Amino acid sequence: MADLTTVSEGEARLVSARDLLRVSNLRVRFQTPHGDVDAVRGISFAVGREETVGILGESGSGKSVSVGAVMGLLDSPPAKIKGEIRYGGLDLVQAPIRETRRIHGDRIAMINQDAVTSLNPGLTVGYQVAELFRVHRPGTSRGDARRKAAELLDRVKIPSARDRLNSYPHEFSGGMSQRVMIAMAIALEPEILIADEPTTALDVTVQAQIMQLLAELREQTGMALILITHDLGVVAESVEKVLVMYAGQIVERGPTAEIIDRPAHPYTAGLLASVPRTEHKDRKLEAIKGAPPVMSAIPPGCAFHPRCGWCRAACRKDAPELTAIEKFRDSACHFATEVYRG
């Protein structure tokens, strides 16, 4: 795993020759009729080759906006993006669109959280998969593109793949539609795959199948995986490193097993306490009190302080910086050491 080094600004960065993607001090502000909204407030992280990274947090914490900025999916205006998103020496924030287009969808691909609405209902599944090769691989014939589409559908374990090329999205179940989206995402053999809530609205059995498929594909191709989720169970089973987000900021990060075993931020501890665990059958689940802040009215100091049992005067006044508490572990809490030590 890459080494964590704390820099003078209080941020932490990953220093590694294996890094494929490095995000530095990313900020995303939306201009709205009711005023500016800071959806992402200065996050930094890196993704190494063949690494699995999970981004965890409640709805509205800034997870999807962050990866939307990475993928160039945010229109400007209303979005205003600052910071660096560096891939292969190219800053995707500052680079011209003609340069970023060869990265997005090709070297960095994404699976959206709602497969059913992401597919065009008026076009066959085969056409939509094959079109990727026609657009991103100029010179590919229609026949070759269709053959590759069939191979991809077979690779993601869609039964009778060649026969299903002429099917329309409404003829697929939610799980099968998600497999089609995965096929489209891996079609061009990306180095980084971003999966934004890939198991949303799927039943438990299908969720397990989709996550198993992603694990198999990652092992076969060696691609890095960024998994966006609010499901701690998915995080525990699927990623090596986790970033916990709250109110547009990273409040904790480190190896997944260590964070689950010994959280160093009250928010992370609250998320863990709200999940049933077999070893705690007799323990009552504890929900985090209150609700996430409205992003246009984030409270002063630590954004989590109105919901935090550790809250003291300093929390209401001063925003804590993300700092190292030990090797590979960072937390943005005035009492991180005490929380970590239990």
Image (cartoon, rainbow, N blue to C red):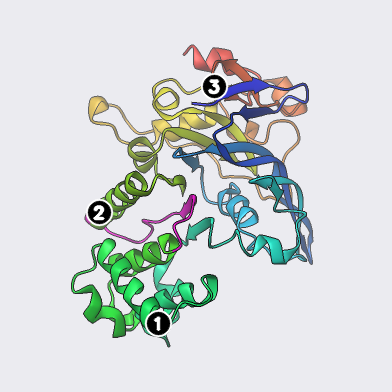
Q: Quadrant of residue 150?
A: bottom left
Q: Amino acid at mark 3?
A: Arg
Confirm or deny contact between disc 1 and disc 3 (CB under 8 A): no
Q: Amino acid at mark 1?
A: Tyr
Which label sits in the foreground, 2 or 1?
1
Tell me if mark 3 has few (under 14), some (14-19) or many (20+) residues whose alpha carbon lies within 10 angstroms of its own: some
Residue 279 versus residue 195: which sits nearer the camera?
Answer: 195
Mark 1 = which residue?
Answer: 127
Name the side, left or right, on which 17 lies relative to 242.
right
- Lower position in the chain sequence, tag 2 or tag 1: 1
Q: State the SS at label 3.
A: strand
Mark 3 = which residue?
Answer: 329
Residue at 64% across, 26% down: 332
- Lower position in the chain sequence, tag 2 or tag 3: 2
Look at the image and tell me whether residue 40 can be seen: no
Name the side, left or right, on which 224 lies relative to 98.
left
Name the side, left or right, on which 312 lies relative to 256.
right
State the CA–CA distance, disc 1 to disc 3. Answer: 46 Å
Residues in magenta, as a range: 188-205
Q: Quadrant of residue 335?
A: top right
- Lower position in the chain sequence, tag 1 or tag 3: 1
User: Picture coordinates of residue 153 (x, y %)?
Assistant: 29, 68
Mark 2 = which residue?
Answer: 209
Q: State the SS at label 2.
A: helix
- Position of 242 relative to 187 (above/below): above
Check residue 201 for magenta coloring. Answer: yes
Look at the image and tell me whether residue 33 can be seen: yes
- Position of 58 relative to 159 (above/below): above
Confirm or deny contact between disc 2 and disc 3 (CB under 8 A): no
Check residue 105 for magenta coloring. Answer: no
Residue 106 versus residue 272: which sits nearer the camera?
Answer: 106
